[in-house]
Image: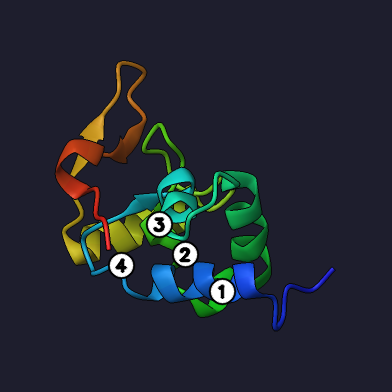
């Protein structure tokens, strides 16, 4: 199912395009910004249109980058100066307290 032309998808894209370098939003916060509770819907839009967007700026609620794209996302975070923190297990994640952004 292609979300092309879908109002939900176009609103998700519009929000994601406004996230500045070095900042992030969670899937849930993108959904909330468009008046929705569907973080999964945001994930579906990102899976469909993410390659044309700054996809690395949309993270999981834990601050982890999009699944299966962690290494590429970390490269973007380092270039953009996105605040990161190391978890107890040694995994790097976005420091949401410092990097979270709201439109």
Q: Is residue 68 visible?
A: yes
Q: Which residue is mark 1?
A: 51
Which residue is located at x 72 percent, y 81 percent?
Answer: 4
Q: Nearer the viewer, mark 4 or mark 1?
A: 4
Q: Are marks 3 and 2 in contact (CB under 8 Å)?
A: no
Question: Alpha-carbon neighbours of circle 4 within 10 Å: few (<14), some, or many (≥20)?
Answer: many
Residue 55 is marked as 2
Question: Alpha-carbon neighbours of circle 1 within 10 Å: few (<14), some, or many (≥20)?
Answer: few
Which residue is located at x 26 percent, y 56 percent?
Answer: 102
Q: Which label's residue is closer to the chain start, 3 or 2?
A: 3
Tell me the SS state at disc 4.
loop
Residue 18 rendering spot, x and y as whole percentages: 32, 73
Residue 19 is marked as 4
Which residue is located at x 79 percent, y 74 percent?
Answer: 2
Residue 44 rendering spot, x and y as whole percentages: 67, 57
Q: Nearer the viewer, mark 3 or mark 1?
A: 3
């Amino acid at each position: 199912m292609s979300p092309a032309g879908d109002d939900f998808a176009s609103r998700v894209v519009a929000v994601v395009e406004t996230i500045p370098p070095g900042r992030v939003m969670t899937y849930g916060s993108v959904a909330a910004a468009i008046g929705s509770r569907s973080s999964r819907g945001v994930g579906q839009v990102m899976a469909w249109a993410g390659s044309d967007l700054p996809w690395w700026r949309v993270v999981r609620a834990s601050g982890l980058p999009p699944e299966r794209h962690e290494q590429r996302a970390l490269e973007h975070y380092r270039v953009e100066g996105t605040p990161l923190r190391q978890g107890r297990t040694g995994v790097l994640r976005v420091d949401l307290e410092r990097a979270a952004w709201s439109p």
